Image (cartoon, rainbow, N blue to C red):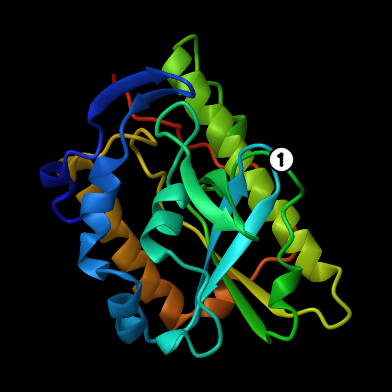
Amino acid sequence: WRDISAARVLRWKPRLDPPTMFGNESLYEVLGYAGDDEQAKGMVKTPFGVFVTDKATGRRRLARFTPGGAAGWDGPLTSHLVASCSIPDVFPPVPLPVGGETRLHIDGARAGDEPDFSYLAGCQDVLVVEMIRPGEPGLWSGFNPLRWRERRVRRGQRRFIDRGIASLHALPEVPRVFRARPSAVLDFSLINFKTEVCLDAFRLGQRDAEAFAAKPLLAQVPGPLSDGDPEMLLSPSQP
């Protein structure tokens, strides 16, 4: 992310079936540092999961990866990561093995079944890192179709998080939920993979993380956040 322009993430490769604008070879290249699955098992230090969505059914699936694969390894890791980045109409879906067959998968936040974070049952604390400030989804985007799509996507992201957190509040033992959000609107297009744009957001994230770590309880807010932020969705300098 500190030099994302060099990766040339958006490489024009239009296709009709399925309709997509760019190829995903660049994503595989960016993730090449992970090596193959055996190498990755030796590099992983903590258990983590990757969400993907079955394109045909709309059902989300959580692929789990643990250090050394000792407690599970739903490989291939790199293909799951690329699939989780496969925004419909932008990047092509990725074939992944599921129960003895191969199925196409896309971005894990794709509209489909309801978000469910109940797999986190048993956790005392849950930290949700958000990209959307309160108020963004409801702001007037004007008649610019690109800004309208941005607003629509951001509204969907907020709704996804709100509903996921609601599933945590429905657990018999409700964990403390901390919502860390940007201190300013992340002022760039969702697919503007340029260093001069992403680096500012990256630095803002570092500053916000330090502030959050110093006083995390200030960010603990029950239920959905209010939509009262007067900030603009995109700055006037954005095309």
Quarter holding residue 58: top right
| Left or right relative to 171: residue 16 | left
Residue at 47% from the left image edge and 51% from the top image edge: 84
Q: Is residue 41 above or below residue 31?
A: below
Q: Decide which of 133, 49 is in the foreground and name it.
A: 49
- Specify the quadrant of the image occupied by residue 24: top left
Residue 148 seen in render = yes
At numbered mark 1, what does the secondary structure look like: helix, strand or loop?
Answer: loop
* Rendered location of residue 96, percent (x, y): 51, 52
Name the foreground residue: 106 vs 125.
106
Does 147 appear above or below 204? above
Is 90 displayed left or right of 57 in the figure? Answer: left
- Residue that lies at the very extreme toward the left in this rendered image: 6
The residue shown at (71%, 65%) is 117
As drawn, the residue found furthest toward the front would be 100
Q: Is residue 182 visible?
A: no
Residue 65 or residue 37, whichever sits in front: 37
Q: Position of residue 56 (x, y in %)?
A: 66, 37
Looking at numbered disc 1 in the image, what kind of residue is underneath it? Thr
The answer to whether residue 7 is left or right of residue 24 is: left
Q: Is residue 218 shown left or right of residue 99?
A: left
Residue 192 in the image: state x and y as whole percent. 29, 34
Badge 1 is on which residue? 57
Residue located at (46% from left, 26% from top): 89
Q: Judge by depth and name the residue closer to the eye, 6 or 234.
A: 6
Q: Residue 231: horizontal and vertical position, in percent?
A: 47, 37
